[in-house]
Image (cartoon, rainbow, N blue to C red):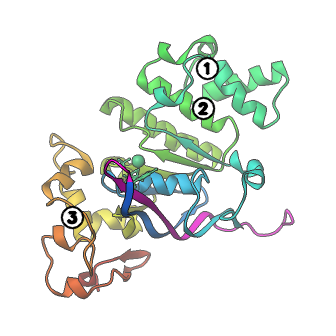
Amino acid sequence: MSTDAPRPADILKVEGLKKSFPVRRGFLQRTTGHVRAVDGVSLAIGRGKTLGLVGESGCGKSTLARMILKLLPSDEGRILFDGTDISAFTDARMKPLRRRIQIVFQDPYGSLNPRMSVGQILAEGLRTVGVRDRSAAAGETERLLSLVGLSARAVDRYPHEFSGGQRQRIGIARALSVGPSLVICDEPVSALDVSIQAQIINLLKDLQDRLDLSYLFITHDLNVVGYLCHRVAVMYRGRIVEEAPAEALFERPLHPYTHALLAAVPDIDAPRGIQAAARELPEEPAAPPAGCRFRPRCPEADERCDRFDGEWVRAGEDHRVRCWRAG
Ligand SMILES: Nc1ncnc2c1ncn2[C@@H]1O[C@H](COP(=O)(O)OP(=O)(O)OP(=O)(O)O)[C@@H](O)[C@H]1O
Ligand SMILES: [Mg+2]
């Protein structure tokens, strides 16, 4: 591509992505079926924007993230990164692109090598983008630490010497060390105290503005979604069931599942987030039913839902939902 070719508005576009895993049971570990972890997901993330991905445990969020990062091959579908179809890219072809898509994990402690100092952790990333010279690396390390709000003295210290929030800052600095365009944040604040969560969210927002980063922000906490995300996609059993600009989703949630998720949010003292709301729904059946997948748990279901095939219903500007009632 020539350098003056127009850049696509979306940094990431995913089309019809699918992944299923074999379910093995018993002593012989025979394959007894498949779980459709990601079942035809399409979404897009605008340059410099944040897409929130919310849904209860096991709905396929991390599987989707791993496919986008090309850590896990997809069964079907396309992944376009900055206009390039990377779906079929081999490791060798992915190499120059790897640095442009980074991930920040939920548990910074588990994902930082305890035997490496912060300086060594960051130097590793810097080397992959060609910063080898000692003094250049030292300067870059200092810049990264200051970007994430850590003192330059952190450089000689080890992960265990930091608090959870500070460790998450190190995880973010590591992601930034290679100069990414897209950062996938997989529950980056779920393991932190509420007061610390806000600091990390503020940091992410600030970094987005300064570095023009795009985020895929995976979370259970809808409070976080409202503050940080421009758009929100709600995922249920491997599928996106509602997608809208964040404001529209909060003002006019349309899918009964989104309602259930939002029901837990208003009272500050109530347990927060989706997990709490989801517990109030009946349990998910082992196999998805015919018709709408959410039907067995839906408080509003009737016989029309058996015939509804989960197609998208347009509910307004940029707002779509897989529920016939929204039509
Ligand atoms: N490597 C694997 N082998 C078999 N099944 C898997 C594998 N990875 C994920 N799964 C299954 O795929 C489904 C989706 O899992 P995934 O980890 O993507 O969910 P999640 O939305 O990230 O959940 P959580 O909120 O708990 O992190 C689950 O049923 C999970 O058990
Ligand atoms: Mg996950």
Q: Residues within 10 Å of mark 1 (few under 14, many from 20)?
A: many
Any mark on residue 173, and which? 2
**Residue 197 screen position, x and y as percent:** 37, 35
* Residue drawn 32% across the image and 29% down it: 193
Disc 1 target residue: 118
**Position above or below: 50 against 207:** below
- What is the three-letter code of the residue carrying label 1? Val
Say whether residue 87 is magenta.
no
Give how far apart the Cα atoms at labels 2 and 1 are.
Answer: 10 Å
The answer to whether residue 97 is left or right of residue 28 is right
Percent coordinates x, y for residue 15 in the rendering: 55, 72
Sequence-earlier tag: 3 or 1 = 1
User: Does residue 284 appear left or right of residue 26 in this picture?
Assistant: left
Pointer 3 with pointer 2, Cβ within 8 A: no
Tell me the residue that label 3 is attached to. 285
Count of numbered labels shown in the rendering: 3
